Amino acid sequence: MRRFRRLRATPAMRKMVRETRLSAADMIYPIFVEEGEGLTAPVESMPTVYRYSIDRLEEILPQIAESGIAGLLIFGVPKHKDEFATEAYCDEGVTQQAIRYIKKNYPELIVIADVCLCEYTNHGHCGVICGEKILNDETLPLLSKMAVSMAKAGADIIAPSDMMDGRVAAIRAALDENGYIDVPIMSYSAKFASGYYSPFRDAADSAPSFGDRKTYQMDPANRREALREIADDIEEGADMVMVKPALPYLDILREARDMTDLPLAAYNVSGEFSMVKAAAKLGWIDEKRIVMENMTAIKRAGADIIITYHALDAAKWLREDD
Ligand code: PBG
Ligand code: ZN
């Protein structure tokens, strides 16, 4: 008889034959930086997540630096929002200031700048609008300016999350023209129009004021199109690609893994996080077990890098278990 149980008999044996290992070194923690002073504002739908003003970042940065995680993905929440997302590409904007602060005080942390207009527009869409139409080509120069401004502030990686067509090529060209030839692009390539983003929209104050994002983000039903989006971003010059959300799209992650040799990131988004937190709070699940199982599933499906609000907890649990 084939006895599979021989290799499951002890913790040591299971550890030796384990196919997928988690590591804090490939996790990224998203943070929200709000313009203002003295702010540590809890995000109600995301327990343990806060919006920090720059002067309060010391409440979280030392923990991130000590945790062994790779770095952070930064989202700015400006006071002033307008039709053209001016604050997104203003060198003195809150996000740019936060990046400068972090790189000055924690140079070893990788800072990834999310590039999208929705936190900066008064209508909450990811591009410029005409009436109720979200314009593609008119948005590209603004995203390019934003990317250059983030690179100038010191961002290590530019991560466009807007889902306009052609943005990777446009951003690459703008970065190169401005001398940022060495700043890589991590593209949110297969980003689905997902119900799992709603806690984030509270956190980043970026919910669209009309309509939805379905004319630019992908239809959750489409697998082949996701692979075309990824292939296209690679052709346009992406250095890394991403699938988002993570857990409901593990099939896409696996196929992306089989299709490209580039580093592949998975974004375990706000709604995925909040569901775990809510069930744990009710005592219905064991949070640590569920988080570690979820992280393992994402890696097993093929992700190299996991962007997750669980990163600090996961890093702590990995240290405890070692
Ligand atoms: C901005 C952006 C969003 C997320 C990351 N960047 C929101 C959206 O597209 O509506 C979602 C992240 C999350 O839910 O954790 N375009
Ligand atoms: Zn957006």
Image (tube, rainbow, N blue to C red):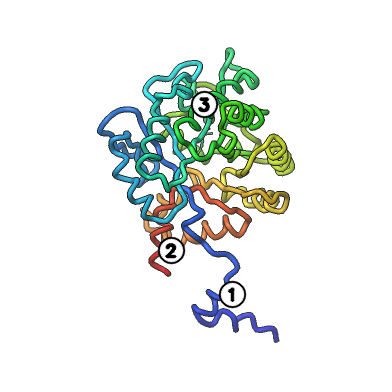
Characterize the local packing of mark 3: few (<14), some (14-19) or many (20 or more) Cα atoms within 10 angstroms: many
Rendering coords of residue 290 (x, y %) = 47, 59
Q: Is residue 143 above or below residue 17?
A: above
Which residue is drawn at the image coordinates 38% and 34% (left, top)? 98
Mark closer to the chain start, 3 or 2: 3
Query: Which residue bears the numbered disc 1?
Result: 17
Secondary element at image label 3: helix
Provide the residue designation for mark 3.
146
**Gap between marks 2 and 1 measured at Cα:** 18 Å
> Mark on residue 318?
2
The reply to whether residue 231 is visible in this rendering is yes
Observer-side mark, 3 or 1, equals: 3
Q: How far apart are marks 3 and 2 (CA)?
A: 36 Å
**Which label's residue is closer to the chain start, 3 or 1?**
1
Nearest the eye: 51 or 133: 51
Residue 169, by quadrant, is top right
